[in-house]
Image (tube, helix red, strand yellow):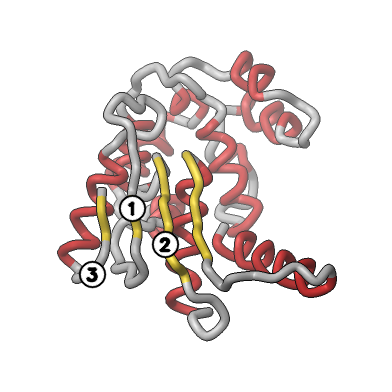
Amino acid sequence: SGTSIIDMLRASKEFCNLNDINLNNQLFLIGYSEGGYTTMAAHKMIEENFSNEFNITASAPSAGPYHLSGVMANLMLSFQPYGQPYYLPYTVLAYQDKYNIVNDLNEYFLDEYAEILPGLFDGYHSVGEINDIMPSIPIQIFRPEVIEEFQTDMNHPLRVKLSENDLHNWAPSSPMKIFHSEGDELVPIENSENAYTNFIFNGAPNVDF
C-alpha cells in the first residue's frame, strides 16, 4: 500500500516537471478507511526508507484498520454479523496472492466458498454481488478447524502476515493528525486508539487524535 502511494508521488512529480507545473515541496497525505491505512503505510515507509526523497509536511490518516492482527482479527472472530462481509475474503485472497500462505484455498475456506469466491474478485463483480453469497458472519466461510487454529496459535501463518502489516506500533516523526468516528462499526475506533497510544509511548513528537 505504501509503495503504491510512493510510486504515485513520483509519477506526479514527473508529470509536473514535464508540464512546467511548479511545486511548493509541501507533501500532505490523507485518506479514509482503506485509504487511512494506506496513508499511514506511506507515512511510515517514507520516513523509514525514503526520507532523502520526500519530506512529509503532515498526514491525516482517517478510520483505517491499523491493527489487523488484533482489533480487526478479533472483530472477525467475534462471530457477529458484519456490514461488509466481503472485507474478509478480500483481505485473505490478497494475502494469498502476495504471500502464497497455503497451497490451496480449500485448506482455509469451506469447499463452496473456495470454489466461488476467487472468481468474484476479478474486477467485474460488485461488492453487492460478493456480499450476496457471503454469510452475514464472515468467519463462517472458514473451516471450523482453521478458525480454532487461528484463535489459539499466535504463530498461525495468516496471523503472522497480518502482524507484519500492522501499523499501530511505531513512531511517526512528521506531524500526524488521526481521525476516527466513535460509531464506526466496520473499522472500530480501537484501531486508532491503539495507534495513538503506542505512538505517544514510542516518543512521537507531534501526533494528535
Residue 177, labelled with which disc? Answer: 1
**From what the image shows, is residue 26 above or below residue 134?**
below
Q: Is residue 79 left or right of residue 196?
A: right
Q: Quadrant of residue 171?
A: bottom left
Q: Amino acid at mark 3?
A: Pro
**From what the image shows, is residue 161 above or below residue 189?**
below
Give the distance between the C-alpha atoms of the residues marked 3 and 2, in whole angstroms: 12 Å
Q: Is residue 70 left or right of residue 18?
A: left
Q: Amino acid at mark 1?
A: Lys
Image location (x, y in percent) of residue 188: 32, 34
| Residue with the mark numbered 2 | 58
- Identified at 26% across, 40% down, the residue is 190
Q: Quadrant of the N terminus?
A: bottom right
Pick whichever of labels 1 and 3 is earlier in the sequence.
Answer: 1
Image location (x, y in percent) of residue 48: 44, 77
Mark 2 crowd level (few <14, some 14–19, many ≥20, 10 Å Cα): some
Dots 1, 2 in contact, CB < 8 A: yes
Pick whichever of labels 3 and 2 is earlier in the sequence.
Answer: 2
Mark 1 crowd level (few <14, some 14–19, many ≥20, 10 Å Cα): some
| Residue with the mark numbered 3 | 205
Give the distance between the C-alpha atoms of the residues marked 1 and 2, in whole angstroms: 8 Å
